[in-house]
Amino acid sequence: MINIAVLVSGGGTNLQALIDAEQAGRLENGRIALVVSSNPGAFALERAAKAGIPSEVLRRRDYPSAEAWGEALAALLAEKEIGLIVLAGFMTVLSADICRRYENKIINVHPSLIPSFCGEGFYGLHVHEAALAKGVKVTGATVHFVSEVVDGGAIIAQKAVEVAPEDTPETLQKRVMRQAEWLLLPQAVSDFCAGRLRVDGATVTKA
Ligand code: GAR
């Protein structure tokens, strides 16, 4: 069994998709052992409590440096013997040290088709605002391994989603979540925990 830590900052709908998958027996060989929030007011914390999953709040501003914050996170992960970290709407950039220690053991969900609309400054609703401003007709979501380059790690899976002419950032965000993120993320986590993912440089293959 692989112990999973899910890192969150907000509403936690992707966390909920993972909880639902686990409860339905669809997280093969994985169990959510810990939820870490960068924000004490995150609704994701209520979702964790309701599912009986232990949670911790780790605010970057409570620590003197990014390194000290990273050390506190590393200690929590070690204590719970975490084998997979999932970033589910987590809005603090992980330290290089954690990225190295958990190489190819950190999965992120991003609400666009990488390499479009990604990198520094592209998070949450901003991603969909940028996609609409560009006038794209198709967008989507990506799940990928996390490297030291923001949104730069090896891509595990992607799914395209149509943009509607009347879309607002909010309606587009909802469609991308429903049609792509909430499906891709639990599947990728299950594939990881079941040992089905092989990484060779930038290429991930599913056995
Ligand atoms: C999701 O759309 C996720 O893809 C995005 O934030 C939202 C979190 O929603 N993540 C990023 O933009 C990371 N760069 P949630 O809290 O309801 O899961």
Image (cartoon, helix red, strand yellow):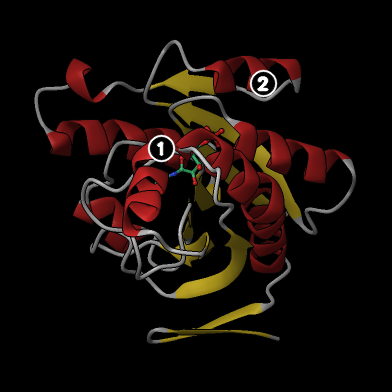
The single residue placed furthest to the left in the displayed view is 64
Nearest the eye: 15 or 35: 15
User: Residue 131 at x, y = what percent?
Assistant: 38, 54
Relative height, residue 195 to residue 127 (above, below): below
Q: Name the residue at 48% across, 52% down.
A: 111
Q: Name the residue at 51% across, 42% down.
A: 88
Return the residue at label 2.
47
User: Residue 127 at x, y = what percent?
Assistant: 37, 48
Earlier-in-chain disc, 1 versus 2: 2
The single residue placed furthest to the right in the displayed view is 24
User: Residue 81 at x, y = what percent?
Assistant: 54, 45
Element marked by disc 1? helix
Q: Name the residue at 55% across, 43% down.
A: 166
Q: Which mark is residue 51?
A: none
Nearest the eye: 158 or 23: 158
In the image, is the residue at mark 2 within 8 Å of ligand 1 by its beta carbon?
Answer: no
Q: Mark 1 to mark 2: distance in Å?
A: 21 Å
- How many other residues sit within 10 Å of disc 2, few (<14), some (14-19) or many (≥20)? some
User: Residue 194 at x, y = what percent?
Assistant: 73, 68
Left or right, 145 with reference to 156: left
Q: Amino acid at mark 2?
A: Arg
Image quadrant where residue 20 sits: top right
Q: Quadrant of the C terminus?
A: bottom right
The single residue placed furthest to the front in the displayed view is 165
Q: Which mark is residue 125?
A: 1
Q: Amino acid at mark 1?
A: Leu
Left or right, 109 with reference to 25: left
Q: Name the residue at 41% across, 39% down.
A: 124
